[in-house]
Image (cartoon, rainbow, N blue to C red):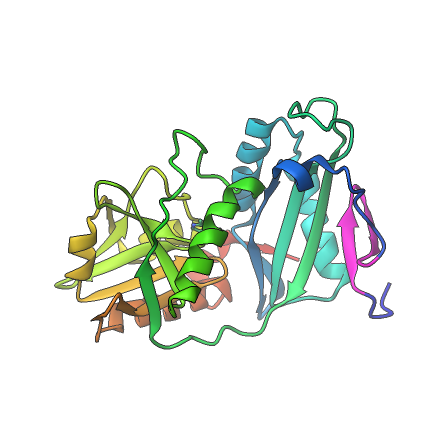
Amino acid sequence: RDDGTPRIWFDGALVDAAAPHATLTTHAMHYGSGVFEGIRSYATANGAAVFRLPEHLERMRAGCDLLGIPFDPAQATQAVLATLRANSHRDAYVRPLAWCGTGSIGLDVAPTAKHLMVTTIASKVHLAVDRVRLTVSAWQRNPSTSLPPLKLCGGYVNSILAKQEAHARGFDEALFVDTDGRVVECTGANVFAVHDGRITAVEHPDALPGITRDTVIALSGAASRAMTLTELREADEVFVCGTAAEVLPIGELDGRAYAAARVGRELGAAYADVVRGRDTTRTGWLTHV
Ligand code: PMP
């Protein structure tokens, strides 16, 4: 349909985005029993293309397996592409969500109905926010021994709290640091640092294995290893990355200013060339709509 009404993919059909209503006893609404993804499509010279779609859906499958939600990556692929086409979206944020519906008000998810939806949101071409101000969160990241770092709905309450606290103190974004002083990640992005030209991808068992992080490692040859907060503060340059954030230079960490942003900006430009299909050596990461 091309009447301009936004469409949403819901359990096998494209419907008016405003039409479906989850009932108030939806299990996921009470307990966070859902799994989502954050994916982007970009306008390329050959039409819209989704960046690293199989990798995003594989991570979603891992979350669904953990929670006992059936998930078929082939069906989800078709759902993502069909929704982008139905909305004529090119530069867009793509949000699939699988969740436990009605059937149990207890913790057991087995009796609940399982659902899948995909919504796409047109995104503006990313404007680099200059001088992002970062602060160490008073909250700890969910430890992976309690909640695996997957995109489980309930797990994101942890990120919400950290973001709220950072904003309340006048910062743009929160940095999680563990009890041993090791850097984990931000609320929705992974961390990189540059010391004397050497690029490091911060590694931590509690951090989400980011697909943008993996991409930036492939583009830069960055070494992946653990890093203390002290080492991060001593870096010449810090940047964070994620599907929504892309590659974002950090201007300040709790009063420590990073004057340099050269590596982050160069990798941001290289990333843009990849996702928009201008880097012809990396088109294998694109799924054309
Ligand atoms: N960490 C967290 C907590 C996130 O939510 C995200 C966004 N998905 C990331 C890191 C970055 O992951 P990706 O590059 O796969 O988007």
Q: Can you say which quadrant of the picture contains the N terminus?
A: bottom right
Q: Which x, y percent locates residue 8?
A: 77, 55
Say left or right for 164 vs 176.
right
Is residue 240 visible in the rendered image? The answer is yes
Residue 197 image-quadrant placement: bottom left
Q: Quadrant of residue 24?
A: top right
Relative to 204, residue 251 above or below = below
Residue 204 percent across, percent down from the top left: 30, 41
Taking the image as shown, residue 6 lies to the left or right of residue 227, namely right
What residue appears at the point 56 percent right and 59 percent down from the top-left corner? 40
Tell whether position 54 is magenta. Answer: no
Considering the whole magenta stretch, tell me its main secondary structure: strand
Q: Where is residue 166 shown, x and y percent of the image?
A: 40, 62
Residue 187 appears left or right of 66: left
Q: Quadrant of residue 263?
A: bottom left
| Count of numbered labels shown in the rendering | 0
Q: Which residue shows up at 65% across the image and 48% down it?
A: 96
55 or 147, which is in the foreground? 147
Instruction: Give the magenta range.
Output: 6-18
